Amino acid sequence: MSETFVPWALFVGYCAVIVAITAWQRRRTTTMQGYAVGNRDVSPVLVGLSLAANMTSVATFVINPGLVYAFGWAGVVGYGIAAPLGIFLGLAVTSTRFRRIGDRFTALTVPQWLGERYGDRRVTVFFAVVALLQVTFLVLIVAGLVTLCVLFIAAN
């Protein structure tokens, strides 16, 4: 058995579990609102875990360590302490009101929520465009991964 068999087996098993859960949940979701907000029957713990998984991206493991390396202790304090604390406090302070207003306006997206909250369609359009600009973050991640791959190949 090769040394890569177990990692590949675990990866394929993980993919199979994700596909099975997706198919099972797909049968339960019948509307766009149900897809976007989970029919409001999802436990807050699962929502929190989903958010944590979403925020723990490639940047956490590729870009942030490089920034910490480049900036030393300032990077540790900024990315290791201040950023998680700020995210936690921001969510703790805003999540209840965000949900209350979202329920009142039946908002499905953050741009829609902001537009409904402030009563201005231009706010919705502006934040929808800003959300689309997050593709630049994807470019940053891909560029970081390519740089790491090139450095790894050059080192070997």
Image (cartoon, rainbow, N blue to C red):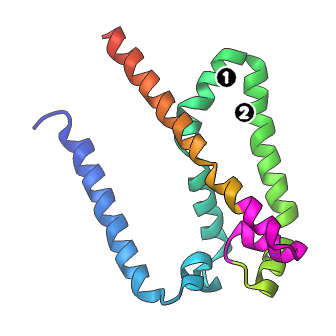
Mark 1, Cα crowd under 10 Å, few <14 / some 14-19 / many 20+, is: some
Report if residue 95 is visible in the image. no
Taking the image as shown, residue 126 lies to the left or right of residue 68, namely: right
Quadrant assignment for the C terminus? top left
Residue at x 41% of width, y 15% of height: 151
Q: Residue furthest top?
A: 155
* Residue type (three-letter) at the residue carrying disc 1: Val
Tag on residue 79? Answer: 2
Give the magenta part as a residue range.
Answer: 108-127
Q: Earlier in the sequence, mark 1 or mark 2?
A: 1
Q: Is residue 73 left or right of residue 57?
A: right
Measuring 82% from the left and 77% from the top, which residue is drawn there?
A: 116
Of 145 and 130, nearer the camera is 130
Q: From the viewer's perspective, is residue 91 above or below residue 35?
A: above
Residue occupying image coordinates x 38% and y 23%: 149
Query: Does the magenta-highlighted stretch encompass residue 131?
Result: no
Q: Which residue is mark 1?
A: 68
Furthest toward the front, the residue is: 122
Is residue 110 one of those drawn in magenta? Answer: yes
Q: Looking at numbered disc 2 in the image, what kind of residue is underneath it?
A: Tyr
As drawn, which residue projects farthest toward the left? 1
Residues at discs 1 and 2 in contact (Cβ within 8 Å) = yes
**Residue 112, percent from left and from top:** 74, 73
Q: What SS does tag 1 mark?
A: helix
Q: On screen, 129 above or below 139? A: below
Horizontal side of 8 relative to 42 (left or right) equals left
